[in-house]
Amino acid sequence: MSLFKPAVLASAASLCLALACASTLAAEAAVAVPAPSGKAVLASTANTATVVLAGGCFWGVQGVFQHTQGVLQAVSGYAGGKADSATYSMVSSGTTGHAEAVQVTYDPRKISYGQILQIYFSVAHDPTQLNRQGPDHGTQYRSAIFTASDEQAQATRAYIAQINAAKVFSAPIVTQVTPLQGFYRAEDYHQDYATLHPNQPYIAYNDLPKISNLQKMYPAIYRADPVLVFKR
């Protein structure tokens, strides 16, 4: 991922305006996947639940889930490696075992685990790309789900099997499913990045279309005002 530093930070209102401009790109990126069924739903009556999702640059994945109803927080960070290598400069080398990831905390009474996965597989990234996502290459950009429980792992594998059977993608899903060993929050300047930098070329081309697709494909789940890490 190229890290540009815009001179002016845009507001959430600017993001909404930029989403309209990105709509022509958005139609090309999304893939309609079947709604989860059976074990893949994983309904719960708990107040909160958490899963860590990796799908390329964390800016876009975070942006998508910050615009998702029922999500309480979406934090960019690193997962898959050790604590002492969980920095952007080290992870960018592709040698730490880490993936850029987003810790999604949500209310299962408002959105199910299966719905979180449906958004992840359909609009947040392309789960058929191995160790890359769009312009970004390396194992740090791999597709991976770091599960918090055996139940999450079973539901995830069931849903991947369901999607593969539906043949909605031209290639098999390569998403890794592995137990979470640790999540390490990314540097503050990576948080809320899509909201703060909607006019940056990388965000406008790669990430705003994902948020636009969320709005078009899941209007009942989309929220216009993102739930940010930092209150502004």
Image (cartoon, rainbow, N blue to C red):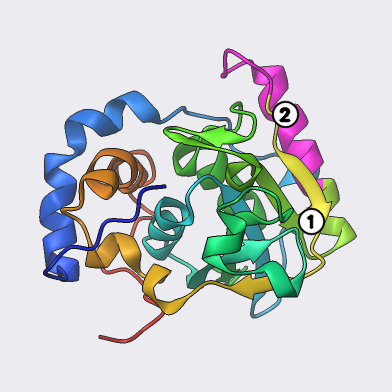
Viewer-nearest residue: 189 or 219? 189
**Mark 2 highlights which residue?**
162
Residue projecting furthest to the right: 150
Magenta stretch: includes residue 168: yes
Specify the amino acid type for callout 2: Gln
Q: Position of residue 75 (x, y in %)?
A: 51, 71
Q: Position of residue 49 (x, y in %)?
A: 67, 72
Q: Main secondary structure of the magenta part?
A: helix
In this rendering, the answer to whether 227 lies above or below 198 is below
SS under mark 1: helix
For the residues labelled 2 and 1, the Cα–Cα distance comes to 15 Å
Q: Residues within 10 Å of mark 2 (few under 14, many from 20)?
A: some
- Residue 129 image-quadrant placement: top right
Magenta stretch: includes residue 205: no
> Residue drawn 39% across and 45% down?
218
Segment colored magenta: 155-172
> Residue drawn 66% across and 27% down?
163
Specify the amino acid type for callout 1: Gln
Q: Residues within 10 Å of mark 1 (few under 14, many from 20)?
A: many
Viewer-nearest residue: 96 or 142? 96
Viewer-nearest residue: 55 or 24? 55
In this rendering, the answer to whether 185 lies above or below 96 is below
**Mark 1 highlights which residue?**
152
SS under mark 2: helix
Q: Position of residue 137 (x, y in %)?
A: 53, 35
State which tag comes first along the sequence, 2 or 1. 1
The C terminus: image quadrant: bottom left
